[in-house]
Image (cartoon, rainbow, N blue to C red):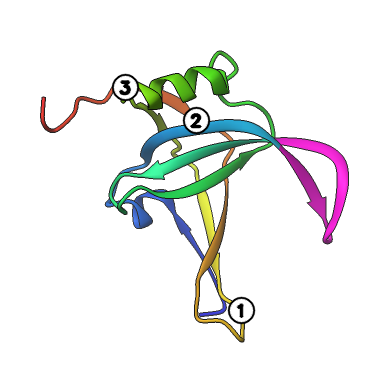
Amino acid sequence: MKNLTTTLPLVNGGVDYAILTGKGDSPVYKDGVRTDDIEIKLDIALQHQRLETLSVKFPEDPLPNVSDEQIEKACREMKFVYVQIPNCKIKLYSRRDDTSVSGSATATSAKLLNVKSETS
């Protein structure tokens, strides 16, 4: 595999939402050079992939009313916040000399969900 573009449901058990674990700024790179522009990054844990993590970058803040501190508190208290990212595009890639697979993800929108636990 050289490069492959896929979607969140295809890597997360058929669902387009995941556990929100962090939020922060991320620098924008153009042609491998860092610019002065900033994107917003949401960190998520894929519940159907043993909580494998993925960072999704957005051109602007998709959740302006949610802070990283609130997300951290929710995780600490195990009151997980779920975020739906319907237009998430994930680029998977591997290096010629390496057998590992890496990825990057982008999207333009996200929304919070109220998901009932399967055990409740």
Residue occupying the point 64% across, 31% down: 24
SS for callout 1: loop
* Residue bounds of the magenta highlight: 26-39
Check residue 110 in the rendering and tell me which mark sits there, or answer none: 2
From the image, tell me which residue sits under label 1. Answer: 95
Residue occupying the point 37% across, 38% down: 18
Q: Are marks 2 and 1 in contact (CB under 8 Å)?
A: no
Residue placed furthest toward the bottom = 97
For the residues labelled 1 and 3, the Cα–Cα distance comes to: 38 Å
Q: Considering only order in the chain, which callout, 2 or 3, is on the residue closer to the N terminus?
A: 3
Task: Give the foreground label among 1 and 3.
Answer: 3
For the residues labelled 3 and 2, the Cα–Cα distance comes to: 19 Å
- Where residue 25 sits: x, y (%)? 70, 33
Quarter assignment of residue 33: bottom right
For the residues labelled 2 and 1, the Cα–Cα distance comes to: 30 Å
From the image, tell me which residue sits under label 3. Answer: 79
Residue placed furthest toward the front = 76
- Where residue 36 sits: x, y (%)? 88, 39
Q: Are marks 3 and 2 in contact (CB under 8 Å)?
A: no
SS for callout 3: loop
Residue 116 among magenta residues: no
* Placement of 3 over or under 72, stated as above or below: below
Residue occupying the point 61% across, 85% down: 96
Disc 3 marks a residue whose amino acid type is: Lys
Q: Is the residue marked by circle 3 packed among few (<14), some (14-19), or many (20+) residues within 10 Å?
A: few
SS for callout 2: loop
Along the line of sight, which residue is nearer the eye, 16 or 119? 119
Q: Are marks 1 and 3 in contact (CB under 8 Å)?
A: no
